[in-house]
Every structure is written in C-alpha cells, then in structure tokens.
Amino acid sequence: MYNILIVDDEPLICRGLASLLETSGLDISNIYTAHNGYEALDYVKMENIDLLITDIQMGAMSGIELMQQAKIIKPWVQVIVVSAHETFQYAQLAIRLGAKDYLIKPINSEQLLNSVRHVLLHMDRSALNQEDMISDLREHFRMDQPLPQRTEILNRLLTEKDKIFTEQMYELEEINQVSLKGPYFTVIKIRLDFSSNSKAATFADKDRLLLQYAALNIVNEVLDKKWDHHSFYSPHEEISIIIQWDETSYGDSSVDKINQLEMIGRSLHFNIHKFLGFQSIVGISQILKGREFLNELNEQVNKAIVWNREHKDHHVFYFGDFKWDIICEDPTEEDLVAQSNMIVERANEYIHQNYTQKGLTLNEVAQKNHVSPNYLSYLFKKNTGSNLWEYVIKLRMDESKRLIQNTDLRRYEISERVGYESPEHFSKIFKKYFGISPSEMKK
C-alpha cells in the first residue's frame, strides 16, 4: 500500500486528481493534498510519502524547489511533475532532479494513471533472497563486464600523483572511451560491506564479484543518462564514480550541487541495501576544477569514509562536512565527538532563534551551520534523540498552545506567529500533534 501526496495551488485540481486516484483501483493507502510547497514539506517530513505529484509553478515555492527539498529529506520519494507549460528547460531540470515523468496540463486521466502505475510498479520490486539473487546474477553473468584497461586507467587517474597527464595517457583514454574533459569534477566512492550480511560474507570470491557487478549496475541505473559520469571497480571491493560538468552545466545555479550529490549518495546506499541486502559506505568529495585534482578528490572520499568509525549507523559522508583544518590528519574519537557536539549545539541555537520563521527549511539550518542537511539530520537525531523537524514542530506547537491558553489572539494570528503559511495548515498540524483542534483547546 502506497501513500501519495498531491500538491497544487488550485484546490479544484487537487480534489480532481485525488478523486481519480481513489477510484483507480491502484494499491493506495492514503492520498494527501497540499496547496503550497511549505505545507507539502510538512507532509513529507511527518508521513511516509512514497509518491509526490506536484505542480511546477506555485508562488512562494516552486515545484522544482519542492522536489529538491523533499529529496533532501527522503531521496527515495518518487516524483511526477505536472505543468501548464511545455517548457523544455523546466522538463530537463525536473528529470535531472529525478522526476519520473513530466505531464502537461490539462492532464489526461489515462496518461496520469499509466504514469502512477508505472512508478508504483517499479517501487514494488523487492530484493530477492540471497540464494535466488546469486542464481539470477549467475544466469546473466555474460552481460558486458567493465573493460579491464578502462578500469585500470580510471583508477590510475585517481591514485597516481605523477606522470599521469602525458600524451600516452590521453591516447589510452581515447582508445578506451574515457572522456574526462570536465573541467569540473567530483568523486564518489562506495565501499561494499559484505560483512553486514552474514550470508554474503561467506560467499565464494566469484559470487562476491557478482554482487559487486550488481552494485555497479545499480549505480548506473541511479545515475543513468542524467549525469555525465564514469563508474568502475576500485580495489578492496569498492566502486568509484567520477562525475563531471562542463562550464555551461556547472554554471546553472538553480540546483545546489552538493545537495544533489548527497541525494545521489543516499539513493545509492538505499538501493544497494534494498536490492542486494548488505550495507555500503558512501564517501563524497568536494567539486574542484581541473582533472589534475582527481587524486586530491580521491583522497577526500577516503577521508570522508573514515568518519564511519565514529558514526557506524550512518552511511553517507561528504568531505566538506568535516573541519579538517581544526583537527589532525587522523582524528581521535575525542576529536570526532567534539566536532559533532559543536555542530548540534549551533544548530539548536539557530532553531530556537528562528523556529517561528515562515518557510524555515532543513537546508537553511544546515547552510547556516556549514554542513549538509543529511549529516545535520543524522547528528541532531543521534545527539538529542529527536528528529530535527519534529523538534521544530514541537517548539511551534508548544508556543501555539501557550498563545491559545494565555492570549486572545485569533487562529490566523497564532498561525502567523509560529511560522505557518495558512490557518488551515496550522490547524491540521495542531490537531495531529495534540489530538484536538485549536478551538477545542481554547474551550
């Protein structure tokens, strides 16, 4: 059973789409509707949303921005975008951010149902048991394997510091279809943790190679043609990915690229665990200009993965989250803990100062503390025991309760004071939190 969220600033369209889906016979548990991006984000944070269907132009927060924010919170949420405009730029950006379809208004009912059916069917694929999966992989083992010489060249580019930019290396790249023109690059590394699955840990070497091959195929499916990338085997049961941008694509400032990379990392970890049954650790480097820095980017991902020592229950690490200039090259456990505590304390201060602000997002709190949303969410929950956004809602609800019981302010005035876009949305959150409406509490 799936939960679907429909977002459009026209209530009539929301009701129409909800009614269509309710009578479709699809395996749907709940259908939620929201009339702006901020209201929609609260649903994403508080409910187990599987599919988001959103309009692209909605006033204060566009559908594109909603997609970005939703996927920061839960990268596995699937998205279908609807728009009144057949604009290539919008469609291209939506697909690049991971939208599964881009539909033009007025929406054709059958087209929408086919699109939703396709997305839900894809989500319904579950991991095979380990023996069946290995059997299935063996059956397809004749599928194209990565070219050994290409893999060797790419690994040399990441690991060798000297004499790698000679004419001979460029010739080898050309022969083996390795195009690294950039000029902007980042590196992602996936360390496969077979020990996290007791059965996988005991497999023969050839079967572990099959699992690595399956993981590489998952990488290529997640990145698909949306990203200009090279993915390849690296030593120690790792998979490396080099992503590159040309000047034009990198100059597009409509998307926060670090957040996008973290979404990719979390999606890779999620899908490898879902379909192959074991954990992985994902390291993400910064973005640098010039292929001569590939070695440095590789060192960054290796350092980022080190933080799994301190955070064994966390699996995606961005190099820029860790203040390497204020700790030693090989940080102690005390160094790691002190830095984590400092990040949470600063975030807590910022939340207390700004929780009544309309449109406050996890991304904003993270940016003010110079860390990624993914890492901040993890640290906050680990250190305080509370989900960060649940904590924001708690502060808002406690303040609204105080205002209801101690002032004569109207509902819309209280809604404004605690940071909600509309009195109706405020009332929904209030009733969900306290079990009674604001007017019932007032009585």
Image (spheres, helix red, strand yellow):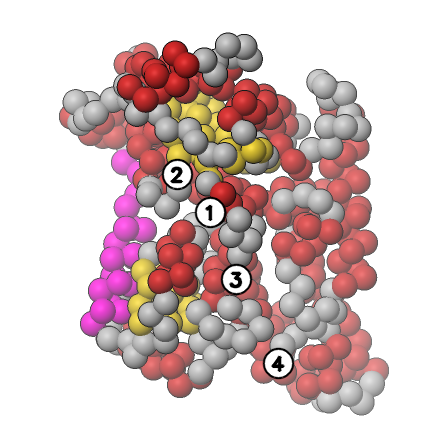
In the image, 190 versus 186, the foreground residue is 186
Magenta span contains residue 398: no
Question: Are circles 2 and 4 on residues that touch, CB within 8 Å?
Answer: no
Circle 2 residues within 10 Å: few <14, some 14–19, many ≥20: some
Q: Earlier in the sequence, mark 2 or mark 1?
A: 2
Circle 1 residues within 10 Å: few <14, some 14–19, many ≥20: few
The residue mark sitting in front, 3 or 2, is: 2
For marks 2 and 1, give the CA distance: 10 Å
Question: Are circles 2 and 1 on residues that touch, CB within 8 Å?
Answer: yes
The answer to which image quadrant residue 130 occupies is top left
Q: Position of residue 395 (x, y in %)?
A: 74, 65
Q: Position of residue 137 (x, y in %)?
A: 22, 27
Q: What amino acid type is highlighted by mark number 1?
A: Ser
Q: From what the image shows, is residue 343 above or below residue 15?
A: above
For marks 4 and 1, give the CA distance: 37 Å
The residue mark sitting in front, 3 or 4, is: 3
Q: What amino acid type is highlighted by mark number 4?
A: Ser
Q: What amino acid type is highlighted by mark number 2?
A: Asp
Name the side, left or right, on which 420 lies relative to 400.
left
Which residue is disc 1 drawn over?
A: 249
Q: Earlier in the sequence, mark 3 or mark 2?
A: 3
Label placed on residue 422:
4
